[in-house]
Image: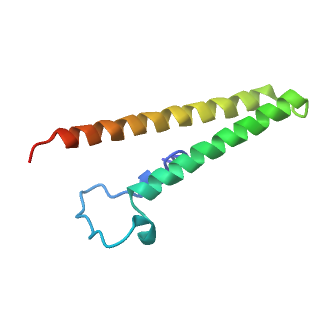
């Protein structure tokens, strides 16, 4: 399965792993949830920029293929909606953890 929005999710382990020691930022290790999330946000931004560019070209008369422009716009919209749903799940998980009593 090739996921263009969250490509890092295909390489995640299926079994739980022990966390590493918090000696430094995760960007040094080159992986982790934060870096995958940043990559996904960057890809959503790139999809939006591509769709905006194609819409601008269509409005200026440089493009004739409205179908491809609409596909690019919808692709950016779906990617944004997915990103918002992931954000909502993260916020809900944080709120659930904060309600736990230790």
Q: Nearer the viewer, residue 25 or 35?
A: 25
Quarter of the figure with residue 17: bottom left
Residue 43, given in percent of the width and then of the height, sits at: 58, 48
Quarter of the figure with residue 11: bottom left
- Does residue 64 sit above or below 16 in this rendering? above
Quarter of the figure with residue 71: top right
Q: Is residue 16 visible?
A: yes
Residue 57, given in percent of the width and then of the height, sits at: 84, 34
Question: Position of 81 compared to 93: left or right?
Answer: right
Residue drawn at x 29%, y 68% as measured from the top left: 22
Q: Nearer the viewer, residue 52 or 7?
A: 52
Residue 87, given in percent of the width and then of the height, sits at: 41, 39
Residue drawn at x 46%, y 34% as measured from the top left: 84
> How many callouts does the rendering have?
0
Q: How is the image coloured?
A: rainbow
Residue extending furthest toward the left: 102
- Does residue 41 sit above or below 52 in this rendering? below
Q: Is residue 64 visible?
A: no
- Does residue 87 sit above or below 22 in this rendering? above
Residue 30, given in percent of the width and then of the height, sits at: 45, 68
Residue drawn at x 78%, y 36% as measured from the top left: 54
Residue drawn at x 75%, y 27% as measured from the top left: 67
């Amino acid at each position: 399965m090739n996921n263009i929005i969250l490509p890092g999710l295909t390489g995640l382990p299926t079994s739980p792993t022990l966390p590493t020691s918090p000696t430094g930022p995760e960007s040094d290790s080159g992986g982790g949830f934060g870096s995958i999330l940043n990559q996904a946000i960057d890809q959503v931004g790139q999809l939006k920029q591509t769709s905006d560019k194609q819409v601008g070209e269509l409005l200026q008369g440089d493009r004739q293929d409205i179908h491809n422009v609409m596909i690019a716009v919808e692709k950016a919209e779906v990617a944004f909606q997915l990103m918002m749903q992931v954000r909502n799940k993260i916020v809900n998980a944080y709120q659930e953890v904060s309600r736990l009593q230790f």
